[in-house]
Amino acid sequence: MPAKSRRVKESLRQVPYSHIQLGYDAGIATLTLNRPEKRNAISYELIQELLAAFAEVSNSPALVLILTGAGKAFCSGMDLDNLKALIGRTPEQSLEDSQIMAKLFRTLYDFPKPTIAAVNGTAVAGGTGLATLCDFTLAVPEAKFGYTEVRIGFVPAIVSTFLLRQVGEKIARDLLLTGRLFDAQEALRIGLITEIVPAENLTKRARELATQLMENSPASLRYTKRLLSAAARAELDAQIDDAVRENAAIRSTADFREGISSFLEKRKPNWSSKA
């Protein structure tokens, strides 16, 4: 089949996902979080579809993956309905939930092909993790980021393992302990994103970067990514095991229950005096 025909066939392909869109064009796979009415919040169903899509793209002829969001947000963190349900989970279920989230982030971090996040708006909590674990992170000037877990009685355990490698301990402590939001300019300054791009040029710039990457040897890119993952593997394995346990353990505390409840009820939390 001629190259032009293949590109047309790829661009017209329909993928049967409910919470994401996945399309192929000219060697580029574009994965769009497609819950704009929920600001692309992370649900259990979304996680499973992302894992399935990552596996599909990994095994496809696509050479580069672009990750972006539909609507005005990239990803606003955990879905409110799923967040509410966390209060009633058993310790075993909490551990399993934490392991699944760790698998999502680790799969993206270790993805065998170059990845580009095109951050079209707010990327908070788990959304910040998805955005910044890509090899390249392009963001619009209006984008907001933040590891806000401590503000609702949670612990940013899993994302912290990657953040420490990206920005160093002092900056990580600031972002994780304050839970504050920060803008694209600060994210660029501390090295969490690669480039700030006007909204009208975001898709074009992401594809330009993808095209630039595809000028390189696909085998060399794959081997280089494998080398980078291998260099971090032993340390990350141990740190993520600890992070999963901490992520599950916090859910048995009074502060966790109060934090989630107050967030859902849109009131100020009444924290326990006990650490």
Image (cartoon, helix red, strand yellow):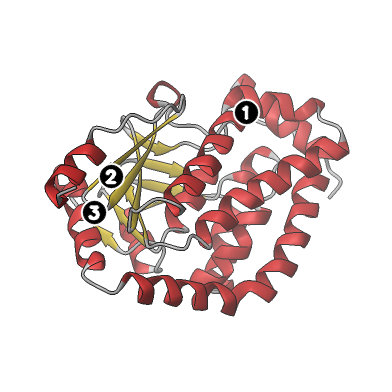
Q: Residues within 10 Å of mark 1 (few under 14, many from 20)?
A: some
Q: Is residue 184 left or right of residue 197?
A: right
Q: Residues within 10 Å of mark 2 (few under 14, many from 20)?
A: some
Residue in the image at 42% along x and 49% along y:
57
Q: Nearer the viewer, residue 110 or 269?
A: 110
| Labels 1, 3: front one | 3
Q: Is residue 232 visible?
A: yes
Residue under label 2, please give it: 142
Q: Position of residue 160 (x, y in %)?
A: 62, 60
Amino acid bearing label 1: Phe
Residue under label 3, please give it: 206
Q: Indicate the quadrant where residue 161 lies.
A: bottom right
Amino acid bearing label 3: Ala
Q: Residues within 10 Å of mark 3 (few under 14, many from 20)?
A: many
Q: Sequence-wise, which precedes: disc 1 or disc 2?
A: 2
Labelled pair 1, 2 in contact (Cβ < 8 Å)? no
Q: Nearer the viewer, residue 136 or 121?
A: 136
| Labels 3, 2: front one | 3
Q: Position of residue 167 (x, y in %)?
A: 49, 71
Labelled pair 1, 3 in contact (Cβ < 8 Å)? no
Residue under label 1, please give it: 263
Q: Nearer the viewer, residue 160 or 142?
A: 160
As measured in the structure, the alpha-carbon distance from the residue carrying label 1 to the one carrying label 3 is 35 Å
Q: Secondary structure at mark 3?
A: helix
As measured in the structure, the alpha-carbon distance from the residue carrying label 1 to the one carrying label 2 is 24 Å
As measured in the structure, the alpha-carbon distance from the residue carrying label 3 to the one carrying label 2 is 17 Å
Q: Indicate the quadrant where residue 87 lies.
A: top right
Q: Position of residue 136 (x, y in %)?
A: 35, 62
